Amino acid sequence: MYNTDLPTRAELPSSKQLLRSTAIAAAAAVAILITVVLPAEYGIDPTGVGRPLGLTEMGELKMQLAAEAAADRAPPAATPGPRSSLPGAIFAGLFIRPAAAQTALPAVAARTDETIITLRPNQGIEVKLDMRSGARVNFNWTATGPVNYDMHGEPPNAGRNSTYSYRNGRGSSGEQGELIARFDGTHGWFWRNRSDRDLTVTLRTSGDYARIIRP
């Protein structure tokens, strides 16, 4: 049987070539981080490339909605602090870190509810569902005018740095879909009315959740 000849030393890449390839790969990763990840996730655009591509606006929207939701969850007398992202530095927003110790929630039967709230100009309101990890809820919400929203979740007894954002948007008149809880805790929506008139948001939910938490 004929065996393929082993490469000679001259045919193998040299240490210099390997180092060069590694440096090129590292430089490419840094370039993607600066030009794509930072603008899209955090609204930071040091090169100016992200804004023409719409990435910077996306990141600014995420940060704005997250800050607004965190400020509304804070007690009235407390001074709102900066909203931290999940552990993991730059890539924190892509992962979820459930609390190490969580109290198991009891099994719940499927239920259906309709929740109606009124938002005054510049007012923000949050409505959450008490859900177990893996629970599914079909939702459909409509607004009588464009609102900013953030669909997110929090483990029980967790700080702000454990908030996970499923979806967010600006100037929306409604959204529908399925919410799948990634961990035990509360999961739901924060809406902000940026118009100069009162708006009504109607939320319809159907699925596995224990209760609705609303203002």
Image (cartoon, rainbow, N blue to C red):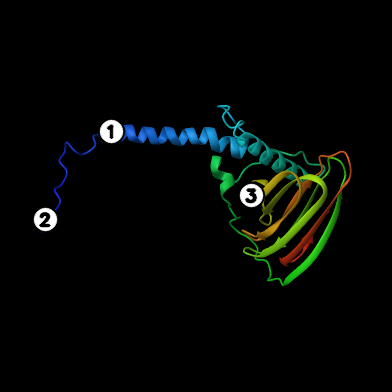
The answer to whether mark 1 and mark 2 are in CB contact below 8 A is no
Give the mark count. 3
Residue for badge 1: 17
SS label for mark 2: loop
Q: Give the residue displayed 42% in from the left and 32% down from the top.
A: 27
Residue for badge 2: 2
Question: Tag 1: residue type?
Answer: Gln
Measure how far apart labels 1 and 2 are at the Cα level.
31 Å
For label 3, count other residues whose C-alpha is less than 10 Å away and answer few (under 14), some (14-19) or many (20+): many
Q: Classify residue 183 as left or right of residue 12.
A: right
Between discs 1 and 2, the one toward the N terminus: 2
Which one is closest to the eye, mark 1 or mark 3?
Answer: 1
Instruction: Pick the quarter of the image with the N terminus.
Output: bottom left
The answer to whether mark 2 and mark 3 are in CB contact below 8 A is no
Which one is closest to the eye, mark 2 or mark 3?
Answer: 2
**Which image quarter: residue 128?**
bottom right
Look at the picture and state if 106 lies above or below 126.
Answer: below
Measure how far apart labels 2 and 3 are at the Cα level.
60 Å
Which one is closest to the eye, mark 1 or mark 2?
Answer: 2
Question: Tag 2: residue type?
Answer: Tyr
SS label for mark 1: helix
Residue for badge 3: 162
The answer to whether mark 1 and mark 3 are in CB contact below 8 A is no
Residue 214 in view: no
Q: Give the residue displayed 79% in from the left and 53% down from the top.
A: 142
